[in-house]
Image (cartoon, rainbow, N blue to C red):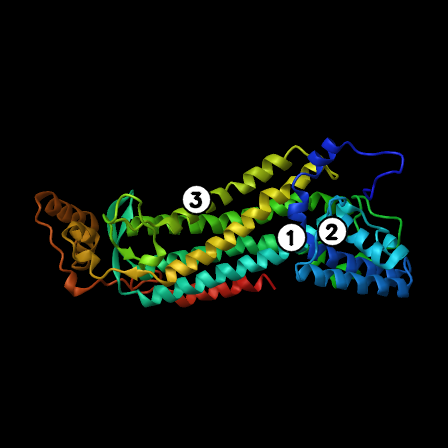
Amino acid sequence: MKLWQKESTSVSESVEKFTVGRDKEFDLALAPYDVQGSIAHVTMLGEVGLMTKEDSAKAVQALHAIEKEIIDGQFVIEEDAEDVHSQVEFLLTKRIGEIGKMIHSGRSRNDQVAVDIKLYLRAEVLKIKEDATELFQLLLTQSEKYKDKLLPGYTHLQIAMPSSFGLWFGAYAESLVDDLEVLASAYQVANKNPLGSGAGYGSSFPLNRKRTTELLQFGSLNHNSVYAQMSRGKTEKIVAMGLSCLAATLSKLSMDCCLYLNQNFGFISFPPELTTGSSIMPHKKNPDVFELIRAKCNRIQSIPNELILLLNNLPSGYHRDLQLTKEILFPAIEELKACFQMAVLMLSNIEIKDHILDDPKYKYLFSVEAVNELVNQGIPFRDAYQQVGNAIEKGDFYFDLSKGLQHTHEGSIGNLSTIGIKSEMEKVLQKFN
């Protein structure tokens, strides 16, 4: 029997199957957070007199036991239970009797699932932040390690100007800084408590919402009960935008690695155990990991749009459409975490080719260096440009790389600004506290 079902009515089996959908599958991820929300709510009910202190304590103790079962992998959502909220309440009532029926006072499944999702997203955002930070630190380490290894830079996929692996690794490290700025904002949105908003219009019970905010360690609460319900779906969309930014960086990095591993570039390689082969071509070393990171991260970048399409024409209040946000967003979170872990594995084992720029096809890479040398001798830039351009057209261009490259400004080959990038990241990470 459903929590909302009357004794005189029953629900069509086909309607029940359609409306429940994949909820039970994704509700298992919410189970520990559902219990945490219930513990906070029941504790507050005991403090404001809606339950006796003895009954509240007994319910909290039983809820902690259920929480342990969830952690130990012993919790299941039974066939007759509609969702995780129903399962927890039925389980509690079975174990402690009538007291279990009291825990829903001043609460709706609407604010239950809203608080569950916020707790879940807050925890998952912090995990992704840690994954991104690990990759960031690796990128900075590799940037310093390979700062003297030169490679060609490209614009329009044409040979452009000299770059370095120090500059390349550092670029993606700094990209993660900006991505985490967006994720930190999403964290702040997820870190607000909707519990106590009920079905979206508050309650006549004297609930203490500030107390549940404190117990659940939220940074703040969603003050307006109508907006607390409106934040459902919106929170998921904002978190998805944060994930999308990180996914875009991983996708671009992966595309670079696919190109650089290609024999026509030949800038990098990986140990054989980190690449795959061909069933017909024995020479192949395929960058399957990076191709899949690229593909998965491109899909993740579509998640905000999918959520926008789901949410855009909904009025205020709760609607069952919101149930689908879980099956859109939750798998994307797991995919992104896996992509970060694989990127760390691959880039920890990257092998950089020496003397890439010695190849004659890169001789025009130094045309700007030659122009700048003439400018330093007092020749106006446009005249120097014409002089070098004419030499290239005639096939007379030559640049002596043995003298080295004199790049000194911040963010150039000779001055990677690693300390500055690290400092920016430290400031962003403080926003997750």
Residue 228 vertical placement versus 357 (above, below): above
> Regarding mark 2 in the picture, which secondary structure is present there?
loop
**Quarter of the image containing the N terminus?**
top right
Mark 1 crowdedness (10 Å alpha carbons): few <14, some 14-19, many ≥20: some
Q: Which residue is mark 1?
A: 29
Separation of residues labelled 3 and 2 (CA atoms) = 35 Å
Separation of residues labelled 1 and 2 (CA atoms) = 19 Å
Is residue 224 visible from the viewing direction of this image?
no
Q: Which residue is mark 2?
A: 194
Left or right, residue 70 beside residue 173: right
Q: Which of disc 1 and disc 3 is earlier in sequence? A: 1
**In front: label 3 or label 1:** 1
Left or right, residue 300 beside residue 256: right
Left or right, residue 275 beside residue 266: right
Amino acid type for the residue under numbered disc 2: Pro
Mark 2 crowdedness (10 Å alpha carbons): few <14, some 14-19, many ≥20: many
Amino acid type for the residue under numbered disc 1: Ala
Q: Position of residue 418 (x, y in %)?
A: 39, 66
The one of 27 and 281 positioned closer to us in this rendering: 281
Amino acid type for the residue under numbered disc 3: Ala
Q: Position of residue 30 (x, y in %)?
A: 67, 52
Q: Position of residue 248 (x, y in %)?
A: 45, 48
Q: Which residue is mark 3?
A: 295
Mark 3 crowdedness (10 Å alpha carbons): few <14, some 14-19, many ≥20: some
Q: Residue at x 16, y 60 (%)?
A: 401
Q: Position of residue 178 (x, y in %)?
A: 48, 55
